[in-house]
Amino acid sequence: MAAVFILPVVIFVSAAQAGPSPGPEAQKRMVRAVDRTLREGVQATLPPHLSTLLGITEEKESLVMQSLVRTEKVVRGLDVSMASRNDVVLFVASAITNDQILYLTSGEGALRRVVSVKAGIGQALRISGEDRKAFEKEKQFWLDRLAPAGATK
């Protein structure tokens, strides 16, 4: 009887951690951004330690197609796993310190995990409201760049 009670609580807590699903228009734009990155991106590799922290693989590198924007201070990227288009990583890295924040999202734009790398040490974070806001800002950057509102396939 206790197991029946615990399971729904675990599911509820997991759903709360994942957060709300994006609206239908944002989902469509995210799918277009993923498709465009798979078609036009550059092949790259997600290192084993990051792939593991994100929950994509166990100590194996992940092949991805990547869209990238680099400035003097910041490197921003969108990686789409070649093994599963439902594993999308948005990342922001300091070009100066190499500190990074990575957001694992679904192919439709639902935030699943946040990983922080500082001084070369990575850790998965409990998703906070601040993380959600930063993720939404980053996701909007890529949607505007790769799948502008009003544009069709």
Image (cartoon, grey):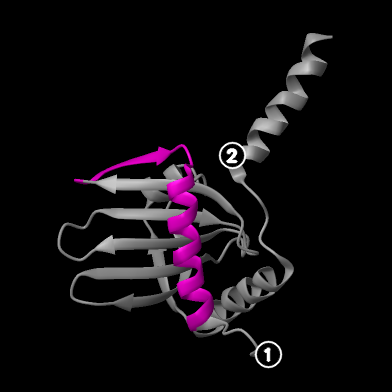
Task: Residue lying at the far top in this picture: please name it.
Answer: 1
Image quadrant of residue 3?
A: top right
SS class, disc 1: loop
Q: At 72% across and 24% down in the image, what residue appears? A: 9
**Figure quadrant of residue 52:** top left
Name, please, the residue furthest toward the left: 96
The location of residue 22, given as percent across then percent down, is 66, 61
Q: Amino acid at mark 2?
A: Gln
Mark 2, residue position: 17
Which range is magenta?
119-145
Question: Residue visible at 19% across and 45% down?
Answer: 119
* Residue positioned 35% across, 69% down in the render: 76
Is residue 96 placed above or below 18 in the rendered structure?
A: below
Q: Earlier in the sequence, mark 2 or mark 1?
A: 2
x and y, in percent, of residue 79 in the image = 47, 67
Q: CA distance from mark 2 to mark 1?
A: 32 Å
Q: Which residue is mark 1?
A: 152
Answer with left or right where residue 9 lies relative to residue 127.
Answer: right
| Residue density around tag 2, few if under 14, some if 14–19, many if 20 or more, within 10 Å | some
Question: Magenta segment: does it hold 83?
Answer: no
Q: Quadrant of the N terminus?
A: top right
Label 1 neighbour load within 10 Å: few <14, some 14-19, many 20+: few
Q: Quadrant of residue 75?
A: bottom left
Three-letter code for the amino acid on which mark 1 is drawn: Thr
Residue that appears at 65% across and 88% down: 150
Q: Is mark 2 in CB contact (under 8 Å) with mark 1?
A: no
Give coordinates of residue 72: x percent, y percent: 18, 75
Q: Position of residue 78 (x, y in %)?
A: 45, 69
